[in-house]
Image (cartoon, grey):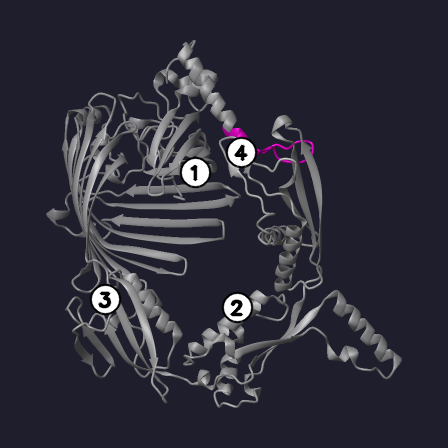
């Protein structure tokens, strides 16, 4: 950071520009109101001399919780007539209302009708809805005065009608069918899992959803032709005993009290039946017959086909070319000959073939046999293009070891994708990549990297483990990855690395698990003068920057949760190298790295209107274990160390420029910083600014808090160890900043600007600044922050 002094005229101008931007951002985040309670919105294209709809308010009267009130108000707002519903456009520092419609009371009346229909569908049948208007006149001179009309809807839903009893009478239909009793028993046996229960609101949506669940239940038990049109719901909101004549006064008093309670807490009795004169074919139970698969179907009946049959299983493969192995196709079909028809298995089969990726269209025709309870299936599969070739030119952000500062550089990637490797819908990917990294400091080209990667994704578990539950095997895949990379960091080193891994991924509901066994890496490091000089200044680097062998097992877990606009993601990973293989005595393992590395991350994204609040917490630790070759003071290898700073971390610091702890080093002594323990938390508020030629421009204000440490004392970085809890909090760095993001749909570019609010890592001649809050901050220091150029949003990419 430059020494503070009297800034020249150019710096003063820049300070004014930054200050202006801060004011604009604050204006976009905060909405003030005038004395009438109306937000300062610019109006364009209003009908001069006529009242126009400027704002609508919905006031809800009733005893609701905060969440219930917000949800109901939101649904009522969606019922407003289009000419009443007002939409503003966000600009850089204000909201703009364009071409508002003239006020028409008939449109407000229609909105009342729509609101009442919504309330009735939710179980409110005694509602009261009225509206009034308020007119504000804004003098505009020759442009014509603005007659802003605010429409206020006052909604009192009344008492919610709830279900008092739910019954099913499928066996009592006058049109007798022997399977009526089967339907009755199916529903009776599923009542424990039913979502429609006594006390629920008498809601049309709840009842409709329950009918859909019953139809699905019946179709999953053989009733292929059954539809919701065969069912009716009959309800009664009046207890018959209340209108029965009472013989004695005591009974009359009791009935009157019951009637009063009924008015205060209205209820309804609901009964589900088969409709009169239902279609009797809907009650036929079907069994699966033959399954014919057309793996290379392109439409039409003129294809010359050949058939391959599996008589015992009922499968027939009808093909024109041998594009797929015959044995592979039936393995992905959940319909088995002779089984009771099950709609869930039918849908799972469609989903399975769609997920494989070798076909672009999947269609299954169900063909019930005439005068029979058997249904045949015809599976039509239209193949996708087998190969995809592509080349990408890109601007990448450096993430390589020993990269000083924020380095960007152009790169090119060539890849070939094969969607049907081995004729069994395996995905094969060959990727050739070349990158350069550029810097304005010293040498123009600082790093060059070339790599070749090869991977195969098998859409199943290989080899097959029958003890794994079917619901996990259905969504599991096997991953084989190999890669070869060469990284040349000018004046520092040349790294040649090879990697091979075999792993599994599976998912269920909102969870996923990944296991890699084994992960094999071998790294050759050719040290150069600049790295040797760093090792001379920091002897511990000699145990960090060396070549070695990793033979590890990796496990990962991820869970996604939340509701609607609030989403949270938790992930955790563990890797161990050498815990078992390190016990094997062989020269091959002389250079084996032995370590355990764990990390965990929690991200929460909350939508607040048009704004988005993203919070993140990350922590990780790596523990190096002793080996005979690496002595009693082992260190984590440099490619497994944690580092802070850069566009995706502590944005007020350059890449690998923060930490460890509160160690004091010059830039020459430690041009890069890292550690084997890391903690970081980030808070980012994103908000829209403008839409320029179809490009969405958003902004953000953020804070980053964190650091990296060594878990053991390192004499080269005194103060860099994590120490006790008090030292941990003292060593936390804090950065503040803002930024702009440009969303081109296919690419998101962001420019963040960060300032150090609290810096534990300073150079020896700046000790007065260490861990001081906002030390030396003044308008002139606003230009001494760090710009970070990034691709895509950090933490949550939406």
- The residue that disc 4 covers is 29
Earlier in the chain: of badge 1 and badge 2, it is: 2
Figure quadrant of residue 234 = bottom right
Q: Are marks 1 and 3 in contact (CB under 8 Å)?
A: no
Mark 3 / mark 4, whichever is N-terminal: 4
Q: Residues within 10 Å of mark 3 (few under 14, many from 20)?
A: few
Which residue position holds label 2? 209
Q: Are marks 3 and 4 in contact (CB under 8 Å)?
A: no
Nearer mark to the viewer, of 4 and 1: 4
- In terms of secondary structure, where does tag 2 sit? helix
Residue 38 included in the magenta stretch of the image: yes
696 relative to 532, above or below: below
Instruction: Examine the rendered structure and indicate whether residue 84 appears above or below residue 515.
Output: above
Look at the numbered disc 3 and give the secondary structure of its residue: loop
Q: Nearer the viewer, residue 720 or 640?
A: 640
Left-right relation of 257 to 114: right
Do the residues under discs 3 and 2 have CB atoms within 8 angstroms? no
Nearer-N-terminus badge (2/4):
4
Residue 412 visible within the image = yes
Measure how far apart labels 3 and 4 are at the Cα level. 55 Å
Q: Secondary structure at mark 1?
A: strand
The residue tagged 3 is 298
Q: Which residues fall within the magenta stretch?
A: 25-44
The residue where tag 1 is placed is 681
Q: Residue at x 48, y 75 (%)?
A: 215
Q: Are marks 4 and 1 in contact (CB under 8 Å)?
A: no
Which is more N-terminal, label 3 or label 1? Answer: 3
Tell me whether the residue at label 2 lies in contact with that at label 4, contact meaning CB atoms closer than 8 angstroms.
Answer: no
């Amino acid at each position: 950071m430059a020494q503070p002094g009297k800034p020249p005229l150019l710096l003063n101008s820049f300070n004014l520009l930054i200050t202006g931007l801060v004011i604009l951002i604050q204006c976009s985040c905060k909405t003030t109101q005038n004395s009438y309670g109306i937000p300062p919105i610019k109006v364009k294209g209003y009908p001069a001399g006529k009242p126009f709809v400027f704002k609508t308010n919905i006031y809800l009267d009733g005893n609701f919780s905060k969440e219930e009130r917000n949800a109901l108000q939101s649904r009522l707002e969606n019922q407003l007539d289009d000419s009443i519903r007002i939409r503003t456009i966000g600009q850089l520092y204000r909201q703009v209302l364009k071409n508002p419609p003239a006020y028409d009371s008939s449109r407000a009346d229609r909105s009342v009708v729509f609101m009442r229909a919504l309330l009735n569908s939710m179980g409110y049948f005694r509602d009261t809805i009225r509206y009034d208007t308020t007119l504000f006149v804004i003098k505009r001179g020759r442009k014509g005065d603005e007659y802003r009309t605010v429409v206020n809807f006052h909604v009192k839903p009344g008492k919610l009608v709830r279900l008092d009893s739910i019954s099913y009478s499928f066996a009592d239909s006058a049109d007798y069918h022997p399977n009526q009793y089967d339907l009755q028993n199916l529903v009776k046996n599923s009542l424990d899992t039913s979502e429609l229960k006594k006390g629920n609101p008498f809601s049309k949506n709840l009842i409709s959803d329950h009918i859909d669940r019953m139809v699905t239940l019946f179709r999953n038990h053989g009733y292929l032709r059954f539809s919701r049109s065969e069912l009716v719901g009959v309800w009664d909101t009046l207890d018959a005993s209340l209108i029965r004549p009472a013989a004695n006064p005591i009974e009359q008093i009791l009935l009157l009290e019951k009637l009063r309670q009924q008015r205060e807490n209205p209820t309804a009795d609901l009964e589900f039946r088969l409709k009169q004169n239902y279609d009797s074919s809907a009650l036929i139970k079907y069994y699966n017959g033959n399954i014919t698969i057309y793996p290379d179907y392109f439409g039409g009946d003129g294809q010359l086909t050949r058939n391959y049959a599996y008589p015992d299983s009922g499968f027939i493969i009808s093909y024109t070319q041998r594009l797929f192995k015959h044995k592979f196709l039936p393995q992905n079909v959940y319909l088995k000959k002779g089984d009771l028809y099950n709609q869930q298995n039918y849908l799972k089969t469609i989903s399975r073939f769609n997920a494989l990726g070798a076909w672009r269209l999947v269609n299954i025709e169900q063909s019930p046999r005439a005068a029979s309870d058997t249904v045949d299936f015809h599976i039509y599969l239209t193949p996708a293009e087998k190969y995809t070739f592509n080349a990408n030119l890109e601007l990448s952000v450096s993430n390589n070891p020993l990269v000083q500062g924020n380095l960007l550089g152009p790169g090119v990637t060539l890849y070939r994708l094969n969607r049907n490797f081995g004729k069994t819908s395996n995905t094969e990917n060959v990727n050739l990549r070349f990158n350069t990294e550029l810097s304005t400091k010293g040498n123009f080209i600082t790093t060059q990297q070339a790599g070749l990667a090869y991977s195969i994704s098998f859409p199943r578990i290989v080899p097959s483990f029958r003890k794994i539950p079917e619901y996990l095997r259905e969504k599991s895949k096997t991953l084989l990855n190999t890669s070869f990379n060469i990284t040349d960091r000018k004046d520092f080193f040349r790294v040649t690395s090879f990697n091979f891994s075999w792993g599994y991924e599976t998912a269920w509901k909102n969870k996923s698990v990944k296991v890699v066994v084994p992960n094999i890496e071998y790294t050759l490091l050719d040290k150069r003068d600049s790295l040797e000089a760093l090792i001379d200044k920091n002897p511990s680097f000699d145990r960090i920057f060396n070549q070695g062998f990793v033979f590890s097992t990796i496990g990962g877990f991820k869970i996604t949760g939340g509701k609607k606009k609030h989403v949270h993601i938790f992930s955790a990973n563990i890797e161990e190298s050498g815990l078992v293989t390190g016990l094997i005595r062989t020269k091959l393992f002389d250079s084996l790295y032995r370590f355990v590395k764990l990390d965990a991350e929690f991200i929460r994204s909350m939508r607040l209107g048009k704004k988005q609040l993203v919070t993140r917490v990350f922590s990780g630790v790596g523990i190096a274990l002793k080996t005979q070759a690496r002595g009693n003071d082992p260190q984590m290898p440099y490619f497994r160390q944690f580092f802070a700073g850069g566009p995706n971390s502590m944005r007020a610091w350059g890449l690998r420029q923060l930490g460890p702890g509160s160690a004091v080093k010059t830039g020459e002594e430690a041009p890069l910083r890292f550690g084997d323990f890391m903690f970081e938390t980030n808070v980012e508020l994103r908000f829209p600014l403008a839409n320029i030629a179809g490009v969405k421009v958003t902004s953000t204000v953020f804070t980053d808090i964190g650091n990296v440490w060594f878990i053991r004392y390192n004499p080269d970085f005194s103060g860099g160890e994590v120490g006790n809890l008090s030292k941990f909090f003292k060593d936390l760095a804090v950065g503040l900043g803002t930024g702009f993001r440009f969303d081109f749909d296919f690419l998101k570019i962001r420019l963040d600007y960060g300032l150090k609010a609290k810096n534990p890592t300073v150079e020896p001649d700046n000790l007065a600044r260490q861990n001081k809050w906002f030390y030396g901050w003044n308008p002139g220091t606003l230009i001494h922050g760090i710009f970070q150029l990034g691709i895509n949003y950090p933490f949550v990419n939406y």
